[in-house]
Amino acid sequence: MKSRSSTEQKQKFTGSLIQAHEQLYYYALQLTEDRDDARDLVQETSYKALKNFSKLKHDEHQNAWLYTILRNTHINNLRSGHHKNIKTNRSDQELQLSNAVMPAYENPDRIYDRKELIEKIRCLPSSYAKPLKLYLAGYAYKEIAKMTDVPIGTIKSRIHLAKEKLKRCYHN
């Protein structure tokens, strides 16, 4: 039988998890660029967090822990081939809407800068934009090469050239 304090802690954590749900959803939406995939990712994150609640040592690190679980789950889904099931026929308007939704706690200047960067990346040819987006999401060159089925040297070159093109856009 669980102790009363352990049960109370889990109930408190569950309440905090529910409160963080919207912010986790917005973060998942940024990663997946698809509402259904974002909802699935948040649900899986919630399940893993509740299942592994006993591993959380400090309550003040709870949000960071949740974001880490969400990001790692997303990365694992991509590595396992789950990304191949993601819809690819989304309209530009839907993508703009997905990218426009940002967490409420984020600085407005950062939101504007991110939107501007996303628009500039969107103007790049897809052969440059896709590897750059994956790189900015935290993937290693080797992982990007495997996910896109392109040689690692080509990936490094495309990311470098994409960065250079973006620099020229900002300096003009």
Image (cartoon, grey):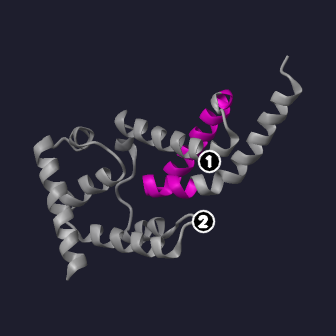
Amino acid at circle 2: Tyr
Secondary structure of the residue carrying tag 1 is: helix
Q: How many marks?
A: 2
**Where the C terminus falls, by quadrant?**
bottom left
Residue at the image point whose x is 52% and y is 75% from the top: 108
Report the side of 150 relative to 30 (left or right).
Answer: left
The residue at the point 72 percent across, 49 percent down is 18
Report the magenta residues as a range.
Answer: 25-54
Image quadrant where residue 74 sits: top left
Residue 94 % position (x, y) = 44, 67
31 above or below 142?
A: below
Q: Position of residue 3 (x, y in %)?
A: 86, 23
Tell which residue pokes out farthest to the top in this image: 1
The residue where tag 1 is placed is: 63
According to the picture, the residue beneath numbered tag 2 turns out to be 105
Q: Which residue lies at the image location 69% right of the left edge and 46% below the top edge?
A: 17
